[in-house]
Image: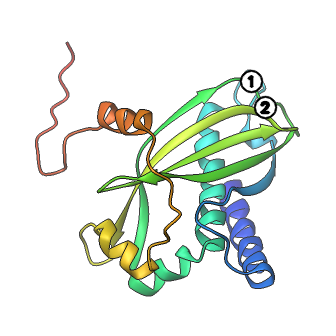
Amino acid sequence: MNVIWRTLLTIWRARRRLRRDGVIEPTSVGRVRVRTLPTDLDLLGHMNNGRYASLFDLGRFDLLIRTGLWDLLAEQKWYAVVASETITFRKSLELWQRFTVESRLLGHDDRSTYLMHRAVVDGEVYAEMVVRARFLRRGGGVVPLEELFEALHKPDNLPDLAPWVADWAEASALPSTKKPAPSIWR
């Protein structure tokens, strides 16, 4: 339950920063300060691997709000979902350790947007996660990126998607929800 309180606090802070500082560029690096709590730990006493994704969500909320995309999504009755993610761990985060969740848009292809999240301590990367996200309509269906960009007045400075990200997306994709995906182990 503690992540819901952190989420609400992050949303409140991001909205406050948006009012104070204005909209940030979509290519900006968002930063959210976090501390490892007892409820984040696994039996070995360091941050549980599953908790990273939940805390990286905080960075995504912050970035969505501060770039102005959050309000546009609400106005259009759209929302973002994670389609795939991969995380790599370098160092463990310990109890009460302060770290920063850094989040940045990596780019887009014809169907998805891609973000990078990092857990950073004193400028050093402890963990890094690549996320592929899609935008859906509350009434059902996918929002084509061209429609999203039209609503956003597509910024000219969106980064090109690095080839390794496109390769990762293709290699990690599951079949569409309209195709069978039987669980067969070989």
Classify 173 as above or below 59: above
Q: Which amino acid does label 2 sit on?
A: Leu
From the image, tell me which residue sits under label 2: 93
Q: Which mark is residue 168?
A: none
Determine whether, in the image, residue 177 is placed left or right of residue 62: left
Determine whether, in the image, residue 45 is placed left or right of residue 79: right
Q: Between 164 and 42, which is closer to the camera in this rendering? A: 164
At which x and y percent is residue 115? 53, 50
Q: Between 32 and 12, which is closer to the camera in this rendering? A: 32
Secondary structure, mark 1, is loop
Please report the residue visible at 80 percent of the width from the left and 42 percent of the height from the top.
36
Q: Quadrant of residue 37?
A: top right
Q: What residue type is labelled 1?
A: Lys
Q: In which quarter of the image is residue 165?
A: top left
**Mark 2: few, some, or many residues within 10 Å (few <14, many ≥20)?**
many
Secondary structure, mark 2, is loop
Q: Quadrant of residue 91?
A: top right
Count of numbered circles in the view: 2
Q: In which quarter of the image is the N terminus?
A: bottom right
Please report the residue visible at 75 percent of the width from the left and 56 percent of the height from the top.
31
Could you tell me how far apart the alpha carbons at marks 2 and 1 are, in whole angstroms? 7 Å
At which x and y percent is residue 102? 70, 49
Determine whether, in the image, residue 186 is placed left or right of residue 44: left
Classify 153 as above or below 97: below
**Mark 1: few, some, or many residues within 10 Å (few <14, many ≥20)?**
few
Q: Between 100 and 26, which is closer to the camera in this rendering? A: 26
From the image, tell me which residue sits under label 1: 91
Please report the residue visible at 19 percent of the width from the left and 12 percent of the height from the top.
186
Whether pointer 2 and pointer 1 mark residues with C-beta atoms closer than 8 Å, the reply is yes
**Numbered disc in front, either 2 or 1:** 1
